[in-house]
Amino acid sequence: MVIISPSILSADFANLERDIKLVEKAGANWLHIDVMDGHFVPNITIGVPVTSSIKKIASIPLDVHLMIENPEKYVEPFAKAGADILTFHYEAAKDVTEIIKLIKSFNIKAGMSIKPKTPVDVVFPYLNDLDLVLVMTVEPGFGGQKFMADCAEKIPFIKKNAPESLIIQVDGGINAETARICTSYGANSLVAGNYIYKSNDISLAIKSLR
Ligand code: DX5
Ligand code: ZN
């Protein structure tokens, strides 16, 4: 089973409920919410109030991707806003073990992400504590960028060292072709923004990723 998590960054924010229902009906498993602070990445997007509004209307789990400095400060607000999976960036975390513990104390899934230039072995010490590892295949900050194939080569190293239950997610430039590369390496969750939201047939786009 491949968990498909459409990124609402590519949705129409003036019609967010409509665009969320669209991917839910088309078979999406999770909803990917990209939180950006203008410091960790050069863009500002969604925060806590929008996330809690989304929680009220969404019927699938909220997969929240924190691209922010000081992620430990925002675990509690996003957990209370309704995040079901909360993923922080390794590069932004002061104490990885502590933040994983904090996320899990809210009974939600803990994820850690690495940027393209971060070596894969930094995740190894935490694979037994994490529920999810997110491999970025673009520089975080914007949707619609080109897939970096060399970043996907990190996946088999994670797979080899991880417990069976670990979810290996990929984010950035995912389409039917790049999805196949990632799943063949062992990824079992795919985030896609532009490929899903800019397609004429959203159900077909989601199916083609699986
Ligand atoms: C990028 C975000 C992604 C982005 C993916 O920083 O983390 O989730 O929305 O968009 P696509 O699939 O268009 O590359
Ligand atoms: Zn993302």
Image: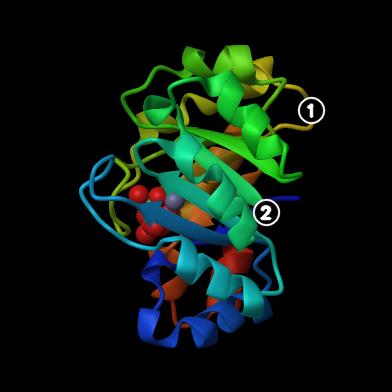
* Residue 116 horizontal/vertical position (percent): 34, 30
Q: For residue 166, what is the image quadrant?
A: top right
Give the left or right position of residue 77, taking residue 25 as reference: left
Residue 132: quadrant of the picture: top right
Would you name the residue on which mark 2 appears?
Answer: 84
> In the displayed image of the protein, which residue is found farthest to the left?
42
Question: What amino acid is found at the position of numbered circle 1 in the picture?
Answer: Glu
Say if mark 2 contacts mark 1, CB within 8 Å. Answer: no
As drawn, the label of residue 173 is none
Q: Is residue 175 visible?
A: no
**Label 1 crowd bin: few (<14), some (14–19), many (20+), radius 10 Å:** few
Name the residue located 43 percent from the left edge and 63 percent from the top edge: 193
Is residue 11 depicted above or below 122 in this figure?
below
Sequence-wise, the earlier of marks 2 and 1 is 2
The location of residue 33, given as percent across then percent down, is: 49, 59
User: Helix, strand or loop at disc 2?
Assistant: loop
Q: Quadrant of the C terminus?
A: bottom right
Q: How many marks?
A: 2
The residue singled out by tag 1 in the image is 164
Q: In the image shown, does 185 or 192 lie closer to the viewer?
A: 192
The chosen color scheme is rainbow
User: Looking at the image, can residue 29 be seen?
Assistant: yes
- Of residues 177 and 174, which is closer to you in this image? 174
Real-space CA distance between mark 2 and mark 1, rounded to the nearest whole angstrom: 20 Å
Residue 194, horizontal then vertical, whole percent: 38, 66
Q: Residue at x 37, y 32 (%)?
A: 115
Q: Nearer the viewer, mark 2 or mark 1?
A: 2
Q: Mark 1 falls on what kind of element?
A: loop
Left or right of 24? Residue 73 is left
